[in-house]
Image: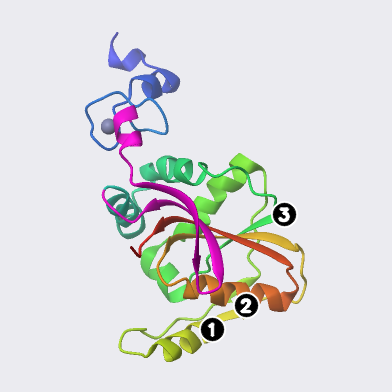
Amino acid sequence: MHLSNLSFLDWKRYAPCCLCGESRAIQHSVCQQCWDGLPWQKQHIHRHDIECFVSCHYDFPINRIIHQFKQQGKFEFIELLTACYLEKPKPRVQAIVPMPIATEKLIQRGFHPSYLLAKALSHHWQIPIWQPVSRHDGHAQRGLSRADRLSNLLDQFYLNTEHCRYKHVLMLDDVITTGASLAALQQQLEQLGCSQIQSMCLCDAVH
Ligand SMILES: [Zn+2]
């Protein structure tokens, strides 16, 4: 078949794996071997009083994929990253709250990574996105003590509404390390009146 005769669906069917580039992509734009080879974790972890579902360990190749998506804007990885989140069954929540990004970072990067992933999940689960919390431009965390880091983080988040539209929500982020950002976001959501807050991340960066 000549390439120009391929429809988009045909192209998807014949497209090579976006990781190895060799085998045919069977699902989520990767081949079966690459999919099986992801550093799966698929479990709930506890950090900073947060219970969070994580799909993978922050290891090769998912760490590279996230880096390329966030730092280089490689949106072709969204399908794969979304599929990793979808290893968890649909949560019973009324809205998805993506981790807020500071305006300074948004301008620098040109897009909001967690929002893009939340958008894909929102479409798949038919659950709306809600962004009642905003984020100030943060000062560097490096060099601060653990307690200072925490209060620094808490100061970064603020409510942009007084109306608690949804009580049951899912906080969404890409990588969890200490869990401090999620804890700070959770605190704001609780203050607003959310009563059931779940969280979910792609990767767990602490081993
Ligand atoms: Zn592959």
Q: At label 2, which amino acid type do we have?
A: Gln
The answer to whether residue 203 shows anywhere in this view is: yes
Q: At label 3, which amino acid type do we have?
A: Gln
Distance Cα–Cα, label 1 vs label 2: 8 Å
Residue beneath label 2, please? 187
- Where does the N terminus fall, quadrant-wise? top left
Q: Nearer the viewer, residue 178 or 114?
A: 178
Q: Is mark 1 within 8 Å of ligand 1?
A: no
Could you tell which of marks 1 and 2 lies nearer the N-terminus?
Answer: 1
Q: Nearer the viewer, residue 71 or 54?
A: 54
The answer to whether residue 102 shows anywhere in this view is: no
Tell me: 40 left or right of 119. Answer: left
SS for callout 1: helix
Could you tell which of marks 3 and 1 lies nearer the N-terminus?
Answer: 3
How many marks can you see?
3
Image quarter for ligand 1: top left
Residue beneath label 3, please? 94
Give the class, few, some or many, for how many residues have Cα within 10 Å of label 1's Cα (few <14, many ≥20): some
Distance Cα–Cα, label 3 vs label 2: 18 Å
How far from the left and from the top, in percent, is residue 164? 76, 69
Quadrant of residue 144 within the rendered picture = bottom left
Q: Measuring 34% from the left and 54% from the top, which residue is drawn there?
A: 66
How far from the left and from the top, in percent, is residue 5? 35, 13
Q: At label 1, which amino acid type do we have?
A: Leu
Q: Measuring 35% from the left and 35% from the top, which residue is drawn there?
A: 35
Disc 1 to disc 2: CB gap under 8 Å? yes
Please report the bounds of the magenta region as a residue range.
31-60
Look at the image and say whether residue 33 sits in the magenta stretch. yes
Q: Residue furthest top?
A: 1
The tag on residue 145 is: none
Height in image: 20 above or below 97?
Answer: above
The tag on residue 154 is: 1
